[in-house]
Amino acid sequence: MKITEPKEEWLIIVNPNAGRGLGKKDWRIISELLKEYKISYKAQFTEYKKHAIELAKEGIANGYRKIIAVGGDGTMNEIVNGCFLQTVCPSTDITLSIVTVGTGNDWGKMFGIPTDYNGAVKVISVGNAFLQDTGVVYYYHGAHREQRYFINIAGLGFDAVVVRRTNIQKEKGRKGKLLYFWNLLTTLIFYRHTQTEVMIDGNKISEKVFTISLGIGKYSGGGMMQTPDAIPDDGLFDITIIKKISRRNVIKSLKMLYNGTILEHPLTMGYKGRDIIIDADPLIHVEADGETLGHSPIEFSILPRSIHVIYNKDNGFGC
């Protein structure tokens, strides 16, 4: 692949299927705003799952160092993986941003990126950026060991099952803000706990676990704060472990996931760490940035301050 000199313009990767087709439908509105704010760009549209990974890699090889995702957190996750799988330049040479299309904005919410198109494009035009951490997870898909990069949150156990069910329904055309919440409630009917060993920087924890979250960011699942104290550039994962818990207690405690007090729950443990190894009996599954991955044994490591991201300086985020 021919490598060209870095370009000043943005590469925009559009997921036309995001938000029940809003990616395609609203692209005209978004493109007009980009012109209004005098943002120079080239746009490409994804055609299949993981296509954004390929487009990001190709774009970087063709000189692009600034990339905007038009889609959701899943589109951004694919772009991030393209940025770290390419071998043309250091990941710290790359700057990312997002114009959210659809219902979810968990990664962007951390950085004050507005959900309205005009607000998001305006923040991009201002161009405030900082280096955030990136996570890498190694997991198994059957007998094959695989890896994935992520920049927001990974979930294991109950959370991973909820995400998998939600993604299956999305592929069948179901959408909406309440889809994740509905699957959360219905998964409670059959999900129990898993005997799990968690190794955090060499310190072992053995518990009957309901769910685990590892956060670089705070928000997931449409605004839940499963890792409410996460700082995206401190070089550490925030780890929230919820131990064996009854269905009634889960429902009663849901408000704590939304108001940021989940770490106060008596069955919750909170940690910080750089290198995490997780194994379980029976197998425990994992998702990252809302993307269904595989199962244990699972390893996490963090890449401190490894990629630039645009943030909204006016939202009070202390970067």
Image (spheres, rainbow, N blue to C red):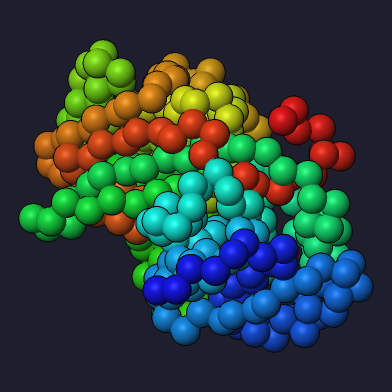
- Quadrant location of residue 198? top left
User: Which residue does the image show at 70% across and 86% down from the upper left?
Assistant: 25
**Any part of residue 254 in sight:** no
Nearer to me, 42 or 233: 42
Residue most toward the left? 143
Image quarter where the N terminus lies is: bottom left
Residue 52, position as x, y percentages in the image: 48, 70
The vertical placement of 250 against 206, above or below, is: below
Residue 318 appears in the picture as rendered: yes
- In the rendered image, residue 231, in percent from the top left (x then y), is placed at 59, 28
Residue at image x 54%, y 69%? Answer: 4
Q: Is residue 191 left or right of residue 227?
A: left
Q: Is residue 169 above or below residue 164?
A: below
Nearer to the camera, 250 or 106? 106
State the residue in front, 302 or 118.
Answer: 302
- Of residues 34 and 107, which is closer to you in this image? 34
Image point (51%, 22%), residue name? 263
Q: Is residue 182 above or below residue 127?
A: below
Q: Which residue is depicted at the point 64% across and 71% down?
A: 12
Q: Quadrant of residue 85?
A: bottom left
Q: Is residue 202 left or right of residue 46?
A: left
- Locate residue 144: give its quadrant: bottom left
301 shown above or below 222: above
